């Protein structure tokens, strides 16, 4: 088949036909019909690149033919050059209103005919290029808008996932997000708090759960039968492969949701560990407080007993000194020794009180650390 531009000549005058064929055949494939209806019939089966259209013909005029073409969306932009022996302004205006691209008056010079045809073919080529560019730009814009909306859904999931306080809530949020993409999925979460598997209709069956577990060991993206999975350390999401066919962005969005959910699982596990640590610290603080209270009570009792012992000792010593007849100086010496011993015992008791106060400070620090841990988990 020829790659040369194809021109349809619609002309009932033999001289004009012979002239056009002689001038144009070296550069173009020129096809000839004599009437407007024949031209319309021809175009239905074989679309030319340009039409040279006589105005005055039997039956349909050239203007009527052009108007019919312009009303047909499939051929509406086909270049049309009128050929006419009429050169009035009214005729040119009629050609313009009919949708013609140019108007040449017979007799036409060979150079003018060639120039006008080349000009219209160049315009048509540029018009086709612009139309293709516009179509591509529109397609790109629609793709960008769709991609932006999809990313917005994923970002919304990342925000909403922060409010999920347990594995089940997170699973449901993942399923709702994927559902907004038109994906029916099943999810398995594996964390320090256990394993949970949920599908669109609720908890997974044992078989479905075993499939998810198997998929989790086959890398980031894995295809098995009619399912495609995306796995991270603590989550596996499985969707029907047909839902991803022809939507390459869906795999990216699926991975984004899975990665965000995996990060939330780590946060939930960390929070649970901090909660357990806080509970242990709280229990330790309570036990320590009870022990300190017991020690303080014991110290008070010891102080009272020590005081009573020294009082009794002083009384007995005084009685003994009277009965054994020791001198006053000897009695004073014994009394001083007793007083020194009492002072030492009291000093020891006071040291124990300082130790108790130090333990209370440690207790307050433990309680403060426990409260901080709890606040961090809540945040």
Image (spheres, grey):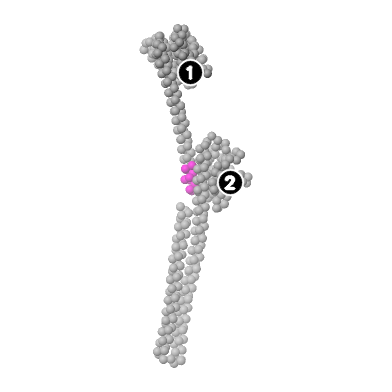
Magenta stretch: includes residue 157: yes
Looking at the rendered structure, the number of numbered marks drawn on it comes to: 2
Residue 250 placement (x, y as % from top left): 52, 38
Q: Marks 2/1: CA distance?
A: 60 Å
**Image mark for residue 263:** none
Residue 300 shown left or right of residue 213 in the figure: left
Residue 82 placement (x, y as % from top left): 42, 13
Residue 262 placement (x, y as % from top left): 52, 47
Which residue is farthest front?
26
Tell me, yes or no, if residue 368 can be seen here: yes
- Quick one: SS at disc 2? loop
Q: Nearer the viewer, residue 320 or 91?
A: 91
Identify the residue under disc 2: 217
Q: Nearer the viewer, residue 290 or 99?
A: 99
- Quick one: SS at disc 1? loop
The reply to whether dot 2 and dot 1 touch (C-beta < 8 Å) is no
Q: Circle 1: is it few (<14), some (14-19), or many (20+) Cα within 10 Å?
A: few
Identify the residue under disc 1: 4
- Residue at screen point 43% across, 23% down: 126
Q: Which quadrant would residue 92 be assigned to in this image?
A: top left
N-terminal-most mark, 2 or 1: 1
Q: Nearer the viewer, mark 2 or mark 1?
A: 1
Magenta segment, principal secondary structure? Answer: helix
Which residue is farthest bottom?
325
Q: Circle 2: is it few (<14), some (14-19), or many (20+) Cα within 10 Å?
A: few
- Residue at screen point 46% across, 86% down: 316
Residue 355 shown left or right of residue 183 in the figure: left
* Magenta region: 154-164
- Give above or below for 54 relative to 345: above
Q: Which quadrant would residue 365 be assigned to in this image?
A: bottom left
């Amino acid at each position: 088949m020829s790659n040369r531009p194809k021109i349809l000549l619609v002309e009932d005058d033999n001289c004009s036909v012979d002239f056009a064929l002689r001038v144009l055949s070296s550069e173009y494939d020129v096809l000839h019909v004599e009437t407007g209806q024949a031209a319309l019939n021809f175009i239905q089966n074989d679309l030319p690149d340009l039409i040279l259209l006589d105005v005055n013909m039997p039956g349909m005029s050239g203007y009527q033919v052009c108007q019919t073409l312009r009303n047909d969306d499939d051929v509406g932009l086909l270049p049309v050059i009128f050929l006419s022996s009429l050169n009035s302004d009214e005729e040119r205006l009629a050609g313009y209103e009919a949708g013609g691209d140019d108007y040449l008056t017979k007799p036409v010079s060979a150079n003018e005919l060639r120039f006008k045809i080349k000009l219209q073919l160049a315009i048509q080529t540029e018009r086709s290029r612009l139309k293709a560019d516009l179509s591509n730009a529109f397609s790109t814009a629609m793709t960008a808008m769709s991609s932006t909306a999809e990313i917005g859904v994923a970002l919304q999931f990342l925000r909403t996932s922060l409010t999920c306080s347990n594995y089940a809530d997170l699973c449901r949020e993942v399923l709702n997000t994927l559902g907004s993409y038109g994906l029916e999925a099943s999810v398995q979460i594996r964390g320090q708090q256990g394993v949970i598997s949920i599908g669109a209709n609720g908890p997974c069956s044992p078989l479905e759960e075993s499939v998810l577990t198997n998929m989790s060991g086959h890398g980031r993206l894995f295809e098995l039968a009619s399912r495609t999975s995306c796995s991270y350390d603590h989550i596996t999401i499985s969707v029907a492969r047909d839902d991803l066919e022809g939507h390459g962005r869906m795999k990216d969005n699926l991975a984004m949701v899975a990665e965000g959910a995996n990060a939330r699982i780590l946060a939930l596990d960390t929070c649970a560990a901090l909660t357990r640590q806080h509970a242990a610290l709280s229990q330790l603080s309570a036990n320590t407080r009870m022990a300190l209270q017991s020690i303080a009570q014991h110290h008070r009792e010891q102080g009272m007993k020590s005081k009573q012992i020294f009082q009794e000792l002083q009384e007995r010593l005084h009685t003994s000194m009277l009965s054994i007849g020791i001198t006053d100086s000897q009695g004073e010496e014994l009394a001083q020794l007793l007083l020194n011993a009492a002072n030492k015992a009291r000093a020891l008791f006071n040291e124990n009180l300082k130790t108790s106060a130090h333990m209370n400070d440690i207790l307050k620090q433990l309680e403060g650390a426990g409260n901080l841990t709890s606040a961090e988990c809540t945040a």
